[in-house]
Amino acid sequence: DVKVTQSSRYLVKRTGEKVFLECVQDMDHENMFWYRQDPGLGLRLIYFSYDVKMKEKGDIPEGYSVSREKKERFSLILESASTNQTSMYLCASSFQTNIQYFGAGTRLSVL
Amino acid sequence: GNSVTQMEGPVTLSEEAFLTINCTYTATGYPSLFWYVQYPGEGLQLLLKATKADDKGSNKGFEATYRKETTSFHLEKGSVQVSDSAVYFCALSFFNKFYFGSGTKLNVKP
């Protein structure tokens, strides 16, 4: 079975903290993605990666960075968390089939 | 550019009612089209897909037909169940990049 694992289901952080969201997939997929999901806005792409050490900006990269040191792991970094980054974060991976497989999500609250 | 528009929810139906969730798209080429479902507290799961015009995707009693002439991919089910209560997302994929609609919440009452 396909598996995408996000390290935390719920996180509470303070404004200004550096936050790491981790995502691991066990399917040897080249492509990995980070989205945020907000009510009424659907899913918005933050960053994606087509290969190890490769990254590309999505539609809303401001305030975020990513790291892909190994094929199976894609990390999202909030350099200095702000309250407007309170959201649900979803990680996904895909291969040539073009189907994206999603993790369960991390609900982040920034106070 | 590429985008997806789907009907706003929530949609509330009684069990065994007929379901339609409308989805239209704008694309610069010939995308693949998808419906994903998100159950409470979970990530998105692929429900069905279609990769070219006139293809019909189907799964678990749901179906959708890729209509190029109307740029639509409406989701239908003949008889919904309480267990179908979830948020449904229409999406298109073009050159390995995905574009999602805003999601439609479906509530099915017994």
Image (spheres, coloured by chain):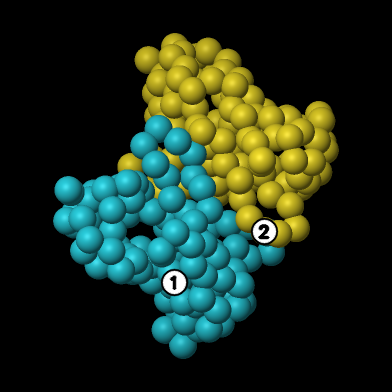
Chain colours: A yellow, B cyan
Q: Is residue A82 left or right of residue A8?
A: left
Residue at figure coordinates x 63%, y 65% from the top left: B94
SS category of the residue bearing label 2: loop
Answer whether labels 2 and 1 touch (C-beta < 8 Å): no
Residue at figure coordinates x 41%, y 19% from the top left: A110
Return the residue nearer the eye: A24 or A35.
A24
Q: Which residue in the structure is indicated by mark 1? A: B64
How many numbered marks have been drawn onto this rendered protein structure?
A: 2
Residue at figure coordinates x 35%, y 68% from the top left: B76
SS category of the residue bearing label 1: strand
In this view, A74 is above or below A59: above
Mark 1 chain? B
Q: Which residue in the structure is indicated by mark 2? A: A98
Q: Position of residue A50 (x, y in %)?
A: 76, 47
Q: Is residue B62 left or right of residue B48?
A: left
Return the residue nearer the eye: A91 or B84.
B84
Q: Residues within 10 Å of mark 1 (few under 14, many from 20)?
A: many
Marks 2 and 1, Cα distance to the nearest angstrom?
A: 18 Å
Residue farthest to the bottom, as pictured: B69
Q: Position of residue A97 (x, y in %)?
A: 71, 59
Return the residue nearer the eye: B17 or A59.
B17
User: The disc labelled 1 sits on which kind of residue?
Assistant: Ala
Placement of the N terminus of chain B among the 4 image quadrants? bottom right
In this view, A69 is above or below B102: above
In this view, B68 is above or below A51: below
**Is any atom of residue B10 visible in this view?**
no
Q: Residues within 10 Å of mark 2 (few under 14, many from 20)?
A: some
Q: Is residue A5 left or right of residue B20?
A: right
Residue at figure coordinates x 61%, y 42% from the top left: A92
User: The disc labelled 2 sits on which kind of residue?
Assistant: Asn
